[in-house]
Amino acid sequence: MLRGLATINYWAADHRAAVRWYAELLGVAPYFERPGYAEFRLGDYQHELGIIDSRYAPRPPAPEPGGVIAYWHVDDVAAALERLQELGAHIYEALTVRGEGFITASVVDPFGNILGVMYNRHYLELLGAAPQS
């Protein structure tokens, strides 16, 4: 039934600042933009990360971050966490070893969204098994 991530959306009251922040973090410009919406393609499978002006949110933002945490695979969680903090993100969950080959951490970006990073050996195993084009 669930086949993979199509788009992860983050909301931001200051949409332009959020797009600039994520472009700096990711090292790429959005590949698609409309007023109040920008989309980045990321990683090995070109998953989409959308940044949406919070005035389009289906309900008012919660006063505190919470909810689901989507974890993006990174090769070095400590380095990713350091870079995120340099750019103004704040620790939500400190670096945590979850078992052999599984390390997680998460931050709250300057716009109130939780961004998870994870080293996940299963991700790398699947990537290695993916057909090469």
Image (tube, grey):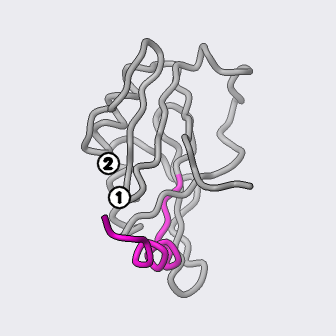
Give me the C-alpha separation between circle 2 and circle 1: 6 Å
- Above or below, 55 relative to 22: above
Residue 104 image position (x, y, % from top left): 53, 67
Residue at image position (74%, 21%) is 59
Q: Callout 2 environment at 10 Å: few (<14), some (14 to 19), or many (20+)?
A: few
Task: Please tell me in which quadrant of the rendered image residue 11 appears.
Answer: top right
In which quadrant is the C terminus drawn? bottom left
Q: Secondary structure at mark 2?
A: helix
Above or below, 55 against 46 in this view is above
Q: Is residue 76 magenta?
A: no
Which residue is outermost to the bottom? 100
Give the amino acid at mark 2. Answer: Glu
Magenta range is 116-133
Q: Nearer the viewer, residue 49 or 68?
A: 49
Whether tag 2 and tag 1 are in contact, CB under 8 A, the answer is: yes
The crowding category of the residue bearing disc 1, from other C-alpha atoms within 10 Å (few below 14, some 14 to 19, many at least 20), is few
Q: Is residue 24 above or below residue 5?
A: above
Tell me the number on the disc at residue 82: 1
Q: Which residue is mark 2?
A: 86
| Numbered circle sitting on residue 30 | none
Residue shown at the point (46%, 34%) measured from the top left: 110
Q: Residue at x 33, y 69 (%)?
A: 132
Q: Position of residue 48 (x, y in %)?
A: 46, 42
